[in-house]
Image (cartoon, grey):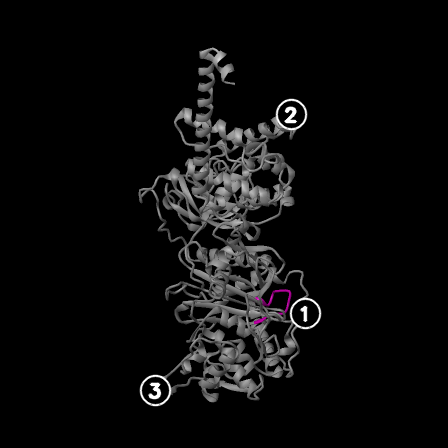
Amino acid sequence: MKVLYENLPEVEIGGRKLVGRVLFGLLILIAILVGATGGLLLVYTTDLPQVDALEAYRPSSITELYDDHGKVIGSFALQRRVVVGYDDFPPVLRDALVSIEDKDFYRHSGINFWRIVGAAYRDIESGGKVQGASTLTMQLARNLFLSPDRHWQRKVQEAMLAIQIERRFTKPQIFALYANQIALGHGVFGFEAASEFYFSKPAKQLTLPEATLLAGLPKGPSYYSPINHPDRAQKRRNLVINAMLEDGKITAAQANDARSAPLTLRLAHDPNSLAPYFVEEIRRYLEGKFGTDQVHEGGLKVYTSLDVELQRAANQATLDGLAAYERRHGWKGHLENVVAEGEVLEKYSHADWDDEPEVGGYVHALVTSAGPGIATLKFGRYTAALGQADVAWTQHKLADILKTGDISYVKILSLGTNGAAKVSLEQDSGAQAALIAIDNATGGIKAMVGGRDFNTSKFDRATQALRQVGSSFKPYVYTTVIDGGASPDDTILDEPVSFDTPSGPYTPHNYDEKFEGIITLRRALAQSRNIPALKLANKVGITSVIGYAERFGVTSKLPPYLPVALGSAEITLLEQASAYSVFPNDGVRVSPRYITRVTDYEGRVLEEDFPEVKDVISERTARIMTSMLREVVLHGTGIAAAKLPFPVAGKTGTTNDFTDAWFVGFTPTMTCGVWVGFDEKKSLGAKETGAHAALPIWANFMTVAMNGKDVGDFQPSPIASHAAQKVDTPDTAPATEESH
């Protein structure tokens, strides 16, 4: 061998040695690079989360509230998300998303090496940071486990996590996780929730233009928002369509049709806006029992007693009743003017405009221009015009009552597809109203209105406001007497009287300042005579009357003073309505309830609420009192309800100076109470009695509530009377209203 080497040329020997040294150096360099890379990977993957957790992973999801027919009436969520499975995302959406975000999704193992190299080269060339190369799996890893910061170190972690995810989960599982997790703008997460929000339908029903619009959102939900930036959204949608065409997912004809389709949204109504006071009551209860995190992130299913259609009727009746009251008392003016407050008309937005407007609804509208004969108004994306004839009820000239920048209050009469609307000018002087309707048999609250506008005031006047109830308290007085053995045809003397009290003589009077002499108890209640009620309460003892009221479910503190018999005590509307349901229930009290059942994310029952039933008075007393309260409607202060085509009983109530107006009434199946007044102790105005202000709202609601239903009839009273025999012939002249 030595001889052979000696015979080789010296240059060839030196070349071989050089090549060896180079190869050895390269091997060392490769080893260093591999070691360094391994070390870096070890450093940046040591603290990576375990993807095993994904097997039990459940994203934050919406807690939904349902009415008694399964319709959604509200929701609570930090992230508005509806979790569904892979098959719930239609092929058109899956194809659109893969074409625009990750063409090789079904082929790669978590990362796309050549895509990363290309993106890195472009970013290095432009001096930017590594970005734009993430697969769907990498995006999922980032969204679930990592920060959104764009650094190459995070990219390494993202890639390693993606590989782990791909090893443990199937492509459909990964797609479903991604499609349920991704943010899509306006507080919406996941494509199912996005489909319901933007198009008011489940993802399974998406068309090609709709699916491609949603598929374009992950790149920049705010930037491509179809609500705020429709031009950008449309361009992005068309880019997705082109990507699908390139991938052979759609035909050229389909692509052309989809690109030419207009950007049409059908934004979902905020379900919480239908019964906001009811939903708020439930939120407070659920958070108190299950905790804030569980309520807003746990995806609970809450089944309630509410009826959507009855709630709509309650909303409409309440707002229409307040509008009628406002018109009776003339134009007050004093409108807020945003120009005077330094705001720019073009940038102004009112809280009312966050919800989709509905025909028959009431909103605050901005006066964008005003002249001698016409004023133009704007609310949301709609515009309307008012002429002099439209404001004739105010008895003022249009130019005198509306100025540019004024915030007016209007009722929506029609909504056009082109953004044109027809409205009527109304007024909001601050008068409030509340309504609550209860199913007699179950105690379920079927409708609840806590005020004119939840956006303006979240104070619930149906459940939180303690107001003097006026003569609507008198049934407790008569119940105490009847339950003690008296008959409705017993007589009492209606005449001037004084009572000795600890504070001195108390000399009451009747509302009409007249006295009828000897009258029956039935007539005394029907005509709401004050003197007989006080005499009866004084005879049996006001503490006994208060005891009966408490048995009926009144929990508010009632002072043991004689004027309480005329309603000087303060009680909530919920207490009054629930108490009155004892009469049609033959003396049985069924406690009011909002919720029937609560289940968790997996469908396990967390709470099931059954009616709480309690005997309050005898069947005899309940039926006699029902017949006496029926007389109030047929021949007394509630005669305005006698025209309804179903049996009604109830009682009006009005307080001194007309500060509170009440009507609480019932049919054989439902009890409803209505209150009207101002939040402060302020008069509604002369003659604004319970019969005049509250009863019309009650009647309008109950007309809808009882329509098409078999209401039945009240059980006959065990004591007949001549008055009771006139049940089908109501008086033509209304009785005088009362005040305590």
Q: Is disc 3 placed on a helix, strand or loop?
A: loop
The residue nearer to you, when weighing 60 against 540, is: 60
First reached walking from the N terminus: tag 2 or tag 3: 2
First reached walking from the N terminus: tag 3 or tag 1: 3
C-alpha gap between disc 2 and disc 3: 93 Å
Magenta span of residues: 641-649
**Residue 371 seen from this side:** no
Q: Residue at x 31, y 45 (%)?
A: 341
Q: Do the residues under discs 2 and 3 have CB atoms within 8 angstroms?
A: no
First reached walking from the N terminus: tag 2 or tag 1: 2
- x and y percentages locating residue 18 in the rendered image: 44, 19
* Magenta: main secondary structure: loop
Q: Is residue 568 above or below residue 298?
A: below
Q: Residue at x 59, y 32 (%)?
A: 104
Q: Is disc 2 placed on a helix, strand or loop?
A: helix
Circle 1: residue type: Gly
Label disc, if present, on residue 252 of the rendered structure: 2
Q: Is disc 1 placed on a helix, strand or loop?
A: loop
C-alpha gap between disc 2 and disc 1: 64 Å
Q: Residues within 10 Å of mark 3 (few under 14, many from 20)?
A: few
- x and y percentages locating residue 224 in the rendered image: 48, 35
The residue nearer to you, when weighing 653 against 389, is: 653
Q: Is residue 163 above or below residue 4?
A: below
**Residue receiving disc 3:** 502
Circle 2: residue type: Ala
**Residue receiving disc 1:** 712
Q: Nearer the viewer, mark 2 or mark 1?
A: 2
